Amino acid sequence: MNQRVDEHFLAQVRRRPDELAVVSGPTTMTYRQLADRATALAGGLAGLGVRRETLVGMAFDRSPDAVVAMLAIVLAGGAYVPVSPAFPERRIAELLDDSGVRLVLADPAGRVRIAAAAPGGVRVLGLADVPRKAGPVPPPAPPGRSPLAYVMYTSGSTGRPKGVLVEHAGIVRLVRDPDYAEFSTVDRFAQLSALEFDASTLEIWGALLNGARLCIVDNETAVVPWRLAEAVRTHGITVAWLTSALFNQLADEDPGMFAPLRCLLTGGDVLSPRHVELVRARHPGLALYNGYGPTENTTFTTVHRIDRRYDGPIPIGRPIRGTTVLVLDGERRPVSRGAVGELYAGGAGVARGYLGNDALTSERFVHIGGERYYRTGDRVHVDPDGVLHFHGRTDGQVKVRGHRIEIGEVTAALRAVPGVTDCHVRADHDGLVAYLVAPGATEQAVRTALAATLPHYTLPDRYVRLARLPLNRNGKVDAAALPLPDRTGAAQHTAAQHTAAQHTLAELWGDVLGVDPATIGPHDRFLEIGGNSITLGALLGRVHHRYGAELSFADAVAAPT
Ligand code: ADP
């Protein structure tokens, strides 16, 4: 099969020029319109010097323009590097510096953010600013190697994020004629993921390389259950990919909302059998899947169709077509049948490596029997039917609300905060807890300093201050001796201190945060006592149920207590 993303897209344009390719609110684009805009922009990018495998940054929220930019970069022969406009400036600067990107396409908000953060010599352009003076068409890719499609950054244990180099062939293998699900021209794919996460690879290319429709759902809608339910209905969405954290939240709030869907992929983290069963019982005809895979293996390595009830862990399934897996021990020998070992992923989805980091690339991407494999760091076993089961990590990488985080990265950032003398970070079921020995810094100062360096989803949810860290006999932090975090940091509030409305709100907060409402006071800030974007979405849903009020994220951010 043809392994080029641009050629598959152009084939769809020839086949169905007048079908809708992208829908976002009132904005629509047919395949022909999308191709015309992207081709014109690609010519302009070539005129600006974009050549085969030139890296071009992209700073966009989800939007039709973002799709045009992504396509244009690929049509010009380049590779896109998504940089979130929501990242702190220091992080943006770090990513631009690491990737060596000289040109960034951005939406208006992204332009302001990137221009403020970009090192000298980086050009930041809106789509309308790219001169339409066409440059040369891209030369054919060198034989024997699939061209680079994108670079996606993921958390690095040493404190610096690492750029994963993903090739066209990995994307084609993921979305074209896959054996784990069926995608066709009548499908409508939800785009719920931010562009810097590889869930968007499945969503965007899954739609555009199959002649299907991409339905873009904005940030606020994506995490507020009743809004998302409405979007699913009005767009008639048939295919969606939800991280397990969001899936659980939605299943709890409104399991009926999945009714229009034909295919629902969830995963990215361990699934909750209870939530899966809730949705299965409600929608017996829905094809529900557990999707497993790291960014380094182009979104999915294995997929499992969940077609029965599971009371225990749900398997991660079999390798998808074009993917091979090995389960090896510490000496890189196959484990005995059914034993737990480390999962190595091979085949067309294996990334080229980490940008500008040969040492880490050769540590994680290894040759075995003449094939390249990525060492996932995930522990698995294979059952007698050849189905894989997940057993956790071999290292300090964790998933918090669907985001991949290296504990080492957060620890390194904390240690760099003035006044912090020691720290320990761990993940619990509610997020990250930071244990701090910081006689010289207030908690607020630490929060502020960290927010200036790390993306918001890697920030600790709770802080515990200690005079010193408890150590075991080996001199390591004694995790069992660490105190449990105090949920609110506030005194107990008696119900009598609350007005009736405060009392009701405290109950709604307590419900979504999983804490005793009596510990929540009128001056507590939702996002500082364990709330996050997903629970805030759930809270807005509860408020809507209870009061009929349609509050937005912006309302909630403006009124944090
Ligand atoms: P993705 O965005 O595709 O989840 P990441 O690179 O962010 O990819 O995270 C990959 C890691 O997430 C895996 O190495 C594994 O530890 C965990 N993971 C992904 N999917 C699953 C799943 N279905 N079940 C359990 N863990 C998963």
Image (cartoon, rainbow, N blue to C red):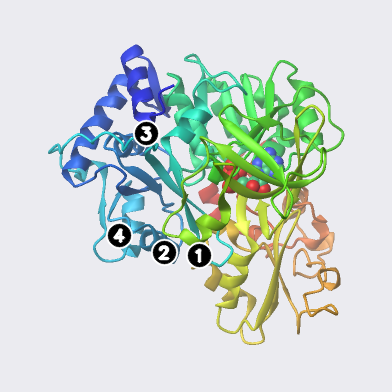
Name the quarter where the N terminus is drawn: top left
**What SS does tag 4 mark?**
helix
- Which tag, 3 or 2, sits closer to the chain's start? 3
Q: Are marks 2 and 1 in contact (CB under 8 Å)?
A: yes
Number of residues whose C-alpha sits closer than 10 Å to that of mark 2, classed few (under 14), some (14–19) or many (20 or more): some
Mark 4: which amino acid? Ala
Q: Are marks 4 and 3 in contact (CB under 8 Å)?
A: no
Q: Are marks 1 and 4 in contact (CB under 8 Å)?
A: no
Q: Which mark is residue 160?
A: 1
Mark 1: which amino acid? Arg
Name the residue that disc number 3 marks: 64
Mark 2: which amino acid? Glu
Number of residues whose C-alpha sits closer than 10 Å to that of mark 4, classed few (under 14), some (14–19) or many (20 or more): some
Q: Which mark is residue 94?
A: 2
Mark 3: which amino acid? Pro
**What distance separates the C-alpha of mark 1 from that of mark 4?**
22 Å
Which one is nearer the viewer's eye here, 442 or 325? 325
Left or right, residue 443 beside residue 70 = right
Name the residue that disc number 4 marks: 115
Residue at left offset 14%, top offset 36%: 134
Residue 104 in the image: state x and y as whole percent. 30, 51
From this view, report whether residue 179 is shown above or below residue 104.
above
- Which tag, 1 or 4, sits closer to the chain's start? 4
